Amino acid sequence: MGLKMIDRSRKEDREKQILTHIIKLYVSKAVPVSSKSVAMSMGNAISSATVRNIMSDLEEAGLIEQPHTSAGRVPTDRGYRCYVDYINNVLLSEKRELEALARQYVARMKSIREIIRMTSHILSSELHCASIILWPSVGDLYLKHLEVIKVKAETALAVLVTITNVVKNYIIRIDRDIDNINLKQLSNFINRNFANHRIEEISGRLHDDSFLKSKNIPAGMSGTALDIIDRIIEKDIEEEAYLDGMDNFADQPEFMDPDITRRILSIFSNRDEIIKLMKGELPNKDLRVYIGEENKAEMFRKCSIVTAGYSLCGSTVGRMGIIGPTRMNYYHVLRTLRYLSDVIDLKLEELRG
């Protein structure tokens, strides 16, 4: 490596180091950061004059800006992006450690409902942000047991239990009147042939004539079973979302302005935008970070949103995330989300047996 390349590498490392200190100082105090405070936070290993020169380079690159004359500097969205990309690479090297911690954590959890509620609470309290977790759709879950009970003519109650111990009830219409004896036979038929299958996979199998012939399944039985499974999927088409931590979110200094507070409240009263965002990320499992103006929805332009997926049997079935100010501790946020993503993955596999 030539001397020029070494010098360039050292300069880039120094710039990243100073940008990191600027962001950490701004995150902790929410006030513009001076060269003197950066030098002090670095143990005066670099003089204030050197820090000022590097801050000028960072400002010219659009990574920090000066909100007022004679004030210190604050990170820009681009600066946060540079920082996030840097720490995201660091986080990848910590995966083994996080997996070990995740295994200890999952031992205390017994159902997917408990996981989601607990995770939502941990995210909001640990990160001091609002949290949101998107439930997996029923089609992505695996059948443990199904019981179909007649309610009245052409109407039945379907009680679905998945292998992750989710219990859901559906009032469904059946095209013909069937008594409870035949519905019991129908339930037994589905449980016997499709236990531990994905709900959507069951629908696909019941649509497949070659599969039905290979199993010698009567057309009447398969047709009614298909109607029931498809109606369950249709009724569950909208995923549930759990939100927590609105108090943590609203207490941030950035959101004390009444106009911004009203915008924040609209996020919680109308969750369509954030749910649309998270559903649009499926089936991707990777961490996603949207900083300030990177958010397409106007209501999130003063916020950062960080999301991650969780999986079952190798497929991403849901997303979780946090909403907070752009002035957030991105390292801690990304580390925590990656960790809890692993927790959910391991627990769902454990529940499958």
Image: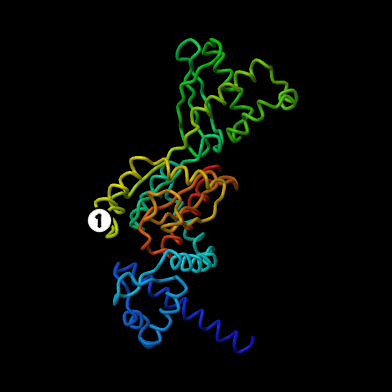
* 16, above or below 209, in the image: below
Find the residue positioned furthest to the front: 69
Secondary structure under the numbered disc 1 in the rendered image: loop
The quarter of the displayed image where residue 40 is located: bottom left
* 43, above or below 220, in the image: below
Q: Amino acid at mark 1?
A: Met
Which residue lies at the image location 46% right of the left edge and 51% below the top edge?
106
Which residue lies at the image location 59% right of the left edge and 87% below the top edge?
4
Residue 129 in picture, x, y percent from top left: 35, 55
- The quadrant the C terminus occupies is top right
Q: Which residue is mark 1?
A: 256
Which residue lies at the image location 32% right of the left edge and 75% below the top edge?
72
Mark 1 neighbour class, 10 Å CA radius: few under 14, some 14 to 19, many 20 or more: few
Residue 109 in picture, x, y percent from top left: 43, 47
- The quadrant the N terminus occupies is bottom right
Residue 240 in picture, x, y percent from top left: 43, 38
Of residues 19 and 66, the one drawn nearer to the viewer in this rendering: 66
* 283, above or below 213, in the image: below
Residue 203 in picture, x, y percent from top left: 62, 29
* 230, above or below 21, in the image: above
Which residue lies at the image location 48% right of the left edge and 15% below the top edge?
155
Q: What's the coloring here?
A: rainbow
Q: How many marks?
A: 1
